[in-house]
Amino acid sequence: MKIKIPKKLNKTQINIYFKKVGLDYLINQKNFNSELLKPDLNDLYFLHNFIIVNKRINILEIGTGYSSLVISHAHKMLIEKYGKKIKNNIYLTANYTILDNSKKYINISKKRNKLINNPLQNFKFSQVQMTEFNGRYCTKFINFPKVNPEFIYLDGPSQYGVKNNNKFSFNIDSKDLMPMSSDILKIENFFSSGTIIISDGRRANINFLMNNFQRNWKIKNIEDRSILILVDEPLGKKNKKKLEFYKF
C-alpha cells in the first residue's frame, strides 16, 4: 500500500495552511510568549496534513504536546467529512487515544485541546516501568489502553520518571541514555495491514522496533521523521474494507 507524503511548504505557506484549516491559534505568537517550548509549525503541518491525506481515523498518540492539538483537529475534520461513510461501514473504527505518563502535560493538552472540541479524543494516564523485550532493556506502560490503532504517533514516553523494576537495577532515567518504548511490539500481531507509525526523532527507539518486529514493515525517513508502514497481506475482509477506505 502506498502512502501520501505532504508537500513541502515554506513558512508563509504553512501559515496560510493553518489559517485555511482553522488553526489560527498556532500562528498567533502571542499564545506562546509565556511558554519555553514553542510549536514547530513545520512538524505540526506535516503531521496534520499526513493524517488528512491518508485518512487515518483510528489513532493512538504516545506522548502529548502541541501534536495532540493538530492530531485532534485533523481527526475531527475527517470524521466530519466522512462521518456517514464511517457510520455505514462496520469495519471502520473512529477513535483517538492519547497516552502519557505525565499528568502535568496531559492536563496542559486537555486545556489546549478544548479549542478543538473533538468528542472522540480520549486521554489516558499510565506510569512507565523498566522491562525487557528479547533480552533488551526498554520501557512499558503499566496500563496500556485497549486499542488497535491504524495510525500511531510515537512521541513518548519521556525517559525520565520511569519506575524501577526490582528484577534488575538498570534504568534509562539518565541524560546519557534515550527513550526506548516496547509497547508497540507487544500489540504488533493485532495490527491491520496498512498501519502507519510516525516518530519525529527517537531514531534509536525506531531502530529497536524495526529490529524486533515480526511482520513486514517498510521504513521511510524524511529529515528527522521516521515513517513505518505495515505492508503485510490483508488479514481478511475487514482489513480489505479498511484499505479501500484509505484509497478512495
Image: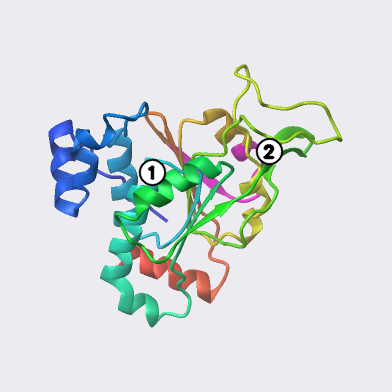
- Left or right: where 102 falls relative to 139: left
Residue 37's mark? none
Q: Residue at x 32, y 74 (%)?
A: 83
Residue 114 position, x and y percent, is 34, 55
**Residue 154 shows in the view:** no
38 or 214: nearer the eye?
38
Quarter of the image that includes the N terminus: bottom left
Residue 76 point in image, percent of width and height: 32, 62
Residue 29 lies, in percent from the top left, at 21, 33
Name the one closer to the observer, 188 or 38.
Answer: 38
Query: Tag 2, which secondary structure?
Result: strand
- In the picture, the quarter occupied by the C terminus is bottom left
Q: Determine crowd level at label 1: few under 14, some 14-19, many 20+ residues with C-alpha closer than 10 A.
A: many
Name which residue lies at 36% across and 62% down.
118
Three-letter code for the amino acid on which mark 1 is drawn: Ser
Count of numbered badges drawn on the protein: 2
The residue furthest top is 176
> Which residues are the magenta region?
209-220
Quarter of the image where one finds residue 5:
top left
Is residue 12 placed above or below 145 in the rendered structure?
Answer: above
Residue occupied by mark 1: 67
Q: Is residue 170 shown to the viewer in this render?
A: yes
Query: What residue would you read off at disc 2?
Result: 139
Name the colour scheme. Answer: rainbow
Pointer 2 local density, CA inside 10 Å: few below 14, some 14–19, many at least 20: many
Counting from the top left corner in percent of width and height, residue 119 is at: 39, 66
